[in-house]
Image (tube, rainbow, N blue to C red):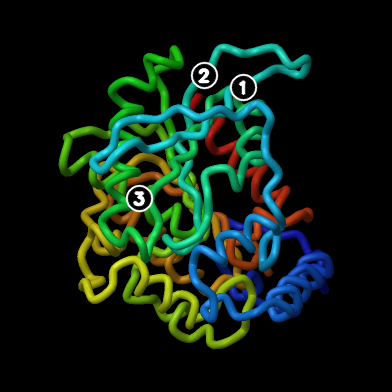
Amino acid sequence: MANVPYDPSVLDASLFDPALIDAETRALNAAIVERINSFPDQWSMAPADVRIARAQGLGAFPAPVFSPRARIITIEGKSGGIPLRIIEPQDEDGRARQPRGVFLHVHGGGWTFGTADSQDIRLQRLADKLGIVTASVEYRLAPENPYPAAPDDCEMAALWLAREGLALFGTDRCFIGGESAGAHLSLVTMLRLRDKHGLTPFSAAVLTSGCYDLGLTPSARQWGEEKLVLNTRDLENFVSNFIGATAANTADISPIYADLRGMPPAHLLVGTRDALLDDTLFLHGRWIAAGNEADLAVWRGGAHVFIVFPGMLAERALTRAEAFLARFL
């Protein structure tokens, strides 16, 4: 029954049937669990040591591959400089292209791990395919820098882009997006710009595998111990690192509770084997109920942020997300 064609935007019971997960995705998920279980428990280590291990490719994710084209610019933040990792578009012959827009990228990592250079190859692909600049935010990480440090940094990066960055790159169009905690911070950033600054600069957003309720949705609470990228314990610890004892049911922390009116069109991407599945399903309902356009893509068998792993499922998902953004250029 595997490899049966399906539309990831159509929700029916067969989409969530584990028996229909294709063989490649099934094997990848098993390999992820085996790989993670072969390493020490990340919560037995200091966050700084986990970050070093992740940079070496030890853990769930492959070691990052860096783009030789990336450069860093530093903008002013509330508590010092904020580095932005910039990749500008080139044509097939390696010649610079006039940018058609700017994509503000916010990396994932549970507000605790991750770096702006961790998605270089995917962002370079996006830059070249759509002819846009990508700018990834090196925001401050918890627990050393808990809430509101990360959203403050992302807010300042978005303000800079709206007020100065677009003119710097010679374009009038910008987008935003991220994975996991980066999707959460992307949504919080859009809300902050609207509510605090009266700005709605983004033409569209791509939100992948986001955590939008830090009190944890049912899928996150009920996931259990299986270490398919992350499990319930991981989510609880990430939230604790980020907000400590702060209440989770405010819109600036859990944007699922926000007034979502006036948000841009959004591509909402998640896999069915993601502990954060409900976050995307719930956000989709609230997004369209608020009068916004949403393109939902639920990918059968996909693990948490499966787009960073090689395979046809990731390729299909990335191609669909890129086609969504291309509509707004």
Kindly report the distance in space between the C-alpha atoms of the residues bearing marks 1 and 3.
25 Å
**In the structure shown, which secondary structural element does the residue marked by tag 1 occupy?**
loop
- Disc 2 marks a residue whose amino acid type is Arg
Q: Around disc 3, counting alpha carbons within 10 Å, would you say few (fewer than 14), some (14 to 19), or many (20 or more)? A: many
Pick whichever of labels 1 and 2 is earlier in the sequence.
1
Tell which of 138 and 49 is nearer to you.
49
Q: Nearer the viewer, mark 1 or mark 2?
A: 1
Q: Identify residue type, mark 1.
A: Pro
Rounded to the nearest angstrom, the CA distance separating label 1 from label 2 is 9 Å
Position of residue 320 relative to residue 179, above or below, is: above
How far separated are the C-alphas under marks 2 and 3?
23 Å
The residue indicated by pointer 3 is 187
Q: Can residue 296 be seen?
A: no
Which one is nearer the viewer's eye here, 86 or 105? 86
Whichever of labels 1 and 3 marks the residue nearer the N terminus, that label is 1
Q: Which residue is mark 1?
A: 89
Q: In x, y percent, where is residue 1?
A: 82, 74
Q: Is residue 305 above or below residue 133?
A: below
Q: Residues within 10 Å of mark 1 (few under 14, many from 20)?
A: many
Residue in the image at 55% along x and 24% along y? 132
Residue denoted by label 2 = 100
Q: What kind of residue is marked 3? A: Leu
Q: Quadrant of residue 204?
A: top left
- Residue 125 appearing in the image: yes
Q: Position of residue 118 (x, y in %)?
A: 60, 48
Image check: 282 left or right of 125?
left
The image shows residue 247 at horizontal and vertical percentages of: 21, 73
